């Protein structure tokens, strides 16, 4: 007889904003739109891997705790990739003229 223990979790982050500078102090372009997309995807995916490792080490964390950890790790990974130029947060830009665009994340 085989018994399976399932402790699967669904982790939902309703909204997350990736912020990267477009122009540098000299007016030159720092990241193109496609580079920014790739960097953001890398930060998200690396942080997801971090979150999965955290869950594996402690499968009794709640979905909310895992979501919080994932966002924190996304911000850390973004800073690593961009040398502290970018950031990730649950809220978007504080500039009301440039609200964060909404786009659903579709994992591969």
Image: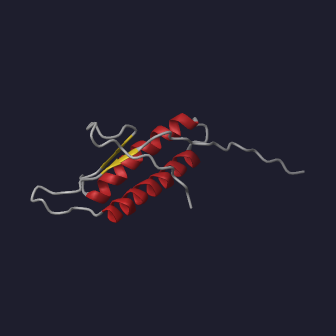
Residue with the most extreme left position: 26
Q: How many marks?
A: 0
Which residue is at 56% across, 62% downward? 108
Residue at the image position 41 percent from the left and 60 percent from the top? 42
Where is residue 18 shown, x and y percent of the image?
36, 49
In the displayed structure image, the side of residue 33 where residue 30 appears, left or right: left
Q: Nearer the viewer, residue 107 or 33?
A: 33
Residue 20: x, y in percent?
Answer: 28, 53
Left or right? Give the position of 27 relative to 54: left
Q: Residue 6 or 15: which is nearer the viewer?
A: 15
Q: Is residue 95 positioned above or below 87 on the image? A: above
What colouring style does the render use?
secondary structure
Kindly give the residue lying farthest to the front in the view shown: 97
Q: Is 89 rendered above or below residue 24? A: above
How far from the left and from the top, in percent, is residue 11?
57, 42
Residue 21 drawn above or below residue 62 = below
Residue at x 57% of width, y 37% of height: 63
26 left or right of 79?
A: left
Which x, y percent locates residue 22? 23, 56
3 displayed left or right of 70 = right
User: Could you tell me which residue is drawn at 53 percent across and 34 percent down?
Assistant: 64
């Amino acid at each position: 007889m085989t018994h399976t223990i399932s402790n699967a979790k669904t982790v939902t982050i309703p909204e997350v904003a990736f912020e990267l500078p477009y122009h540098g102090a000299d007016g030159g372009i720092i990241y193109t739109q496609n580079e920014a997309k790739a960097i953001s995807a890398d930060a998200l995916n690396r942080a997801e891997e971090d979150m999965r490792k955290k869950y594996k080490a402690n499968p009794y964390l709640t979905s909310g705790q895992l979501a919080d950890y994932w966002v924190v790790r996304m911000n850390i990974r973004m800073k690593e990739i961009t040398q502290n130029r970018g950031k990730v947060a649950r809220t978007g830009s504080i500039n009301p003229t440039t609200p964060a665009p909404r786009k659903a994340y579709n994992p591969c």
